[in-house]
Image: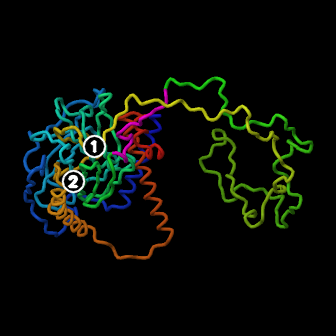
Amino acid sequence: MAHKLNFLLLAALALQAKRVRGNEPAVESAAEEPKHTVQLPQFTPYTVPGAALWEQFIGELEPQWKRSRASKQDKDEDRYDGEWAVEEIEELAGIAGDKGLVVKSEARHHAISTRLDKPFDPAHNGLVLQYEVKLQKTLNCGGAYAKLLASPMNNEFSDATPYVVMFGPDKCGESKVHFIYRHLNPVTGEYTEHHLEQPPTPPADSLTHLYTLSIRPNNTFAIMIDGTERKSGSLLENFTPPVNPPKEINDPKDKKPADWVDEESIPDPDATKPEDWDEDAPAMIPDEDAVKPKDWLEDEPLMIEDPKAEKPADWDDEEDGDWAPPMVPNPRCAEADGCGPWTRPQKRNPEYKGKWAPPLIDNPAYKGKWAPRRIANPDYFEDLDPYKLTKIDAIGFELWTMQSGITFDNIYLGDSAKAAEQIAEEVWKPKHDSELAVREALNPRPAQKTESKLSGVLDLFKVRFGDIAASVTGFYARVQHEGLVEAVRQDRSGAIAV
């Protein structure tokens, strides 16, 4: 299977490269890069009183943030060797002097984390997690989600580190905003991951976008992108699997009796095939009413030798065999109703009945559909306040990405929705508005012109085919690093694309 996936990956990458070459002007040198005259606002630090974490990446990367040098769980060959940097934005900057946490490596595993000053307890007033993501390069496959790490965090950060909440955008085939929370089963003592059903889709452009997750003390949640609510619901109802297991389950020891009859209908044993039932009658027969068209050229072949073809000068009959001109469609056939021997068209046989089968009747021995008996679920519990999550010791980004340039900034963790709204209005929005102005200056909208319907159809086809190519690329990457079974489970749309 690997060679097939390699072929699909190459095809997908070739298509993506073709789209880039076809839609973007070539940049021959750094001196020819487009410039703009937009006056950018200057970065100024912003304070958020009472935050469990407020990070603007003003200082150096370390020691505040710690890069992991561990390996992925059970995969010594997959080390977290991706590089990180705190640096100013290079692509479509909106604030002069603004820095962010930037993924610097391609096709690598990355992991980095920072500890909170003290553990944060969502059981008091819920939690609000908000941060910015900017894709400085087109993202075909990669994650940009954050993990709130459980307290106490004792070991080097990796995929094996217990987390409380995982939230943020991800694109590897299917694009979605993850929201997963881990809940402790008090009966088994094990944690279960609960995944949000029908998560929202993240934007994919190079602007800075703001992702906000609010978990409230009434067990409701809300996900916002750029200050607009995109998904809301209940921690008790909108997740798979549900946080509270069922009170009853099927008895795993109960087996269907060998003499149980659950066929509701059976063939009538007293039925006999009618004497006039012809099982050998064909489904289609020649149409005896059909008449050969007058201009049907029965003596003309469909294909003829190309009269314009000439034997190549370097043709050697001894080495190449006897030369024969190539065959081409007979031009006389194009002007007539047809050529060659004429045969009557087929029509449905009115006498056709097919193979006879006795009709079905109610089964006198039918006992009903069998189902195992229900028993009390030994792992049952009821938690009516799942918002009271485990205490949080740190926040981290543990990612795989095919592209570099993913940038994080203005990370807020706390319990104040008002503080998050103020950050959105006073920090993110000015940056976003400035980026829009820069993008407009660099790419002024062309004058509208009327395009043919065919052009519109071709454009739509090109975009959809590009999406499929990106899905194939993302699915391939998951297979390479997570295995086929896990890739299919996580990325069904990518599997369908393949």
Which of discs 1 and 2 lies nearer the camera? The answer is 1
Asked which quadrant contains residue 348, the reply is bottom right
Asked which quadrant contains residue 354, the reply is top right
Q: Earlier in the sequence, mark 1 or mark 2?
A: 2
476 w.r.t. 209: above or below = above
The dot on residue 119 is none
100 w.r.t. 360: above or below = below
Q: Which residue is found at the position 72% from the left and 38% from the top? A: 265
Q: Which residue in the structure is indicated by mark 1?
A: 385
Could you classify mark 1 by the number of other residues whose Cα lies within 10 Å: few (under 14), some (14-19), or many (20 or more)? few
| Residue 398 visible in rendering | yes
| Residue 13 visible in rendering | no
Q: What is the spatial separation of the Cα atoms under label 1 and label 2, in whole angstroms?
A: 29 Å
Q: Position of residue 363 (x, y in %)?
A: 73, 35
- Residue 186 shown left or right of residue 290 in the figure: left
For the image shown, how many numbered marks are present on the structure?
A: 2
- Residue 245 shown left or right of residue 404 in the figure: right
Q: Position of residue 214 (x, y in %)?
A: 24, 51
Indicate the amino acid at tag 2: Glu
Q: Which residue is found at the position 38% from the left and 60% from the top? A: 22
The dot on residue 132 is 2
Q: Which residue is found at the position 73% from the left and 55% from the top? A: 303
460 w.r.t. 181: above or below = below
Q: Which residues are magenta?
A: 236-251
Of residue 88 and residue 230, the one placed in the foreground of this image is 230
Could you classify mark 2 by the number of other residues whose Cα lies within 10 Å: few (under 14), some (14-19), or many (20 or more)? many
**Residue placed furthest toward the right:** 275
Secondary structure of the residue carrying tag 1 is loop
Asked which quadrant contains residue 346, the reply is bottom right
Structure colour scheme: rainbow
- Residue 261 shown left or right of residue 205 in the figure: right
